[in-house]
Amino acid sequence: MLTLARVRSTVRDGLVSLDEYVAAMKPGQEAIYTITGDNLDVLRHSPQLEGFRARGVEVLLMTDPIDEFWVQAIGSYKDKPFKSATRGGVDLDKITPPEDRKDEKSEPPPAKLASLIAIFKLALGDAVKDVRSSDRLTDSAVCLVADEGDMDMHFERLLKQHRQLDTMSKRILELNPRHKLIERLAATVGEAGASDQLSEFAWLLLDQARIIEGEQLPDAAAFARRLSTALERGLSAAA
């Protein structure tokens, strides 16, 4: 019956079969990548897809609630495992990038990126499972992903909406080391008073990632306060 399945994807206008997907897999690609959600347009603009798009890797877009269940039940197709694009274990480095993007990974990360990540981890504490550098982001500064052993993020939200889950898993916050904002924040590490400001930015970026995922902010007032302070500081510096 899987040969009859047809799904939307990130690289085709029409529907694609699993056979067509497998036939078009890139060198080094070992899995059938999927992303699930409620809205097709929202899925197409998910930051988690940026790295796949940069490498020309097709991702199946699944918007029917039943997709969450049959993909997990089947597990694989023609010895190719299904893997969520929103999981932290995705290794895009194994997939050969297009010729015009092969030089992008050669750029070194910011010198103080490790220190910035350490400050973010300390500031966010138990609000996240981890903070780490990302190889999946090309345009966005941050995104949230599920740990490899945790449930898919959309699946968890679906279960919680139907009162089948009380507590959701903590997410991993991934930072884009080549984003101008992350580079600028890393450059301020060690400056006088920078630690407190970077802690505030950690929460701002976490809330930004939550908003992109369609999640409700646990403290919207704190987000608004931090955003106003950051804007005021930016305007003062520009004056």
Image: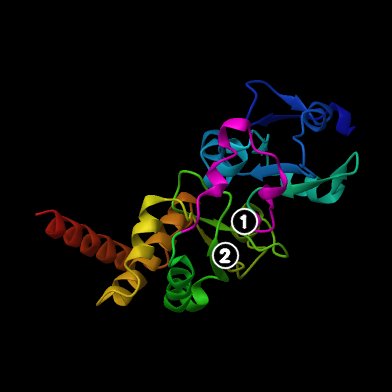
Give the CA distance from mark 1 to mark 2. Answer: 8 Å
Q: Position of residue 215 (x, y in %)?
A: 48, 56
- Residues in magenta, as a range: 87-109
Residue 66 visible: no
At x 18%, y 62%, the residue is 233
| Label 2 residue SS | loop
| Label 1 residue SS | helix
At x 48%, y 78%, the residue is 125
| Left or right: residue 97 compared with residue 123 | right
For residue 10, which quarter of the picture?
top right
Q: Is residue 95 magenta?
A: yes
The residue labelled by disc 1 is 153
The residue labelled by disc 2 is 171
Instruction: Mark 1 or mark 2: name the one nearer the start of the chain.
Output: 1
Depth order, front residue of 119/34: 119
Look at the magenta stretch and give its main secondary structure.
loop
Q: Residue furthest left?
A: 239
Mark 1, Cα crowd under 10 Å, few <14 / some 14-19 / many 20+, is many
- The answer to whether marks 1 and 2 mark residues whose Cβ atoms lie closer than 8 Å is yes
Image quarter of the N terminus:
top right
Mark 1 or 2: in front is 2
Image quarter of the C terminus:
bottom left
Q: Position of residue 32 (x, y in %)?
A: 77, 41
